[in-house]
Image (tube, rainbow, N blue to C red):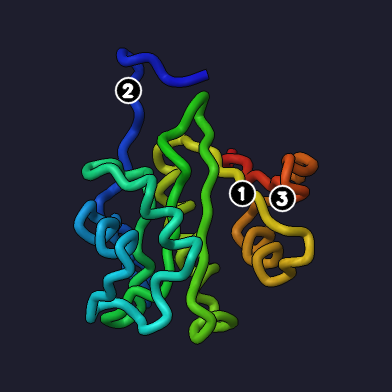
């Protein structure tokens, strides 16, 4: 089911931040550079990864639910965002980081910052993860994705985060 034109989809803040990170929407200019293989100085040398480029195909200027750069210090080191606005109060989230920053709590911090905002507008999140991706399963569990919904058509686990009561 998709939202009707009359339905009000809540917005997220343009800038979401945490102690170390800024989650900044990927602009259409950034997306065009990513898709064309052009690199910007404000991006880590290994960014964007293939998944980040795929996320860039979903960019719509002004869409606060779309993909965002994960900025650590002055460099984008990954991306995080939803696969579109919520439908029936829920949407799917995806994230990924360049290898150089993995294991330093960046993914957990980015997801916690995003979750804090989705909780404020009453939107549940779900995520799909390969069962052998222990690090990502751990990030999801740490961030409250405690509901296991089985697997999707790609064999990935589907985990959801209930809204706080």
* Identity of the residue drawn at 32% across and 47% down: 59
Give the image location of residue 160, x and y in percent.
Answer: 65, 44
* Identity of the residue drawn at 53% across and 54% down: 94
Q: Earlier in the sequence, mark 2 or mark 3?
A: 2
* Identity of the residue drawn at 50% across and 61% down: 51
Numbered disc in front, either 3 or 1: 1
Numbered label attached to residue 127: 1
Most distant residue in the front direction: 36
Numbered label attached to residue 91: none
Looking at the image, is 138 positioned above or below residue 5? below
* Identity of the residue drawn at 29% across and 61% down: 24
Residue at which label 2 appears: 8
Looking at the image, is 13 positioned above or below residue 43? above
Q: Earlier in the sequence, mark 2 or mark 1?
A: 2
Marks 2 and 3 sit apart, C-alpha to C-alpha, by 28 Å
Residue at which label 3 appears: 146
Looking at the image, is 62 positioned above or below residue 2? below
Q: Secondary structure at mark 3?
A: loop
Q: Earlier in the sequence, mark 3 or mark 1?
A: 1
Q: Residues within 10 Å of mark 1 (few under 14, many from 20)?
A: many
Q: Residues within 10 Å of mark 3 (few under 14, many from 20)?
A: some
Quarter of the picture holding the C terminus: top right
Q: Is residue 63 left or right of residue 52?
A: left
Q: Secondary structure at mark 1?
A: strand
Q: Is residue 159 left or right of residue 92?
A: right
Give the image location of residue 149, x and y in percent.
Answer: 76, 40
């Amino acid at each position: 089911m998709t939202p009707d034109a009359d339905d009000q989809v809540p917005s997220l803040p343009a800038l979401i931040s945490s102690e170390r990170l800024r989650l900044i929407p990927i602009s259409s200019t950034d997306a065009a550079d990513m898709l064309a293989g052009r690199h910007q100085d404000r991006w880590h040398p290994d960014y964007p990864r293939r998944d980040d480029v795929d996320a860039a195909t979903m960019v719509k200027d002004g869409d606060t639910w779309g993909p965002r750069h994960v900025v650590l210090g002055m460099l984008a080191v990954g991306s995080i965002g939803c696969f579109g606005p919520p439908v029936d109060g829920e949407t799917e989230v995806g994230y990924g980081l360049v290898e150089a920053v993995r294991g330093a709590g960046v993914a957990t911090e980015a997801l916690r910052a995003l979750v804090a905002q989705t909780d404020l507008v009453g939107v549940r999140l779900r995520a799909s993860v390969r069962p052998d991706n222990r690090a990502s399963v751990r990030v999801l569990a740490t961030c409250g994705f405690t509901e296991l919904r089985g697997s999707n058509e790609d064999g990935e686990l589907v985990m959801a985060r209930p809204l706080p009561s």
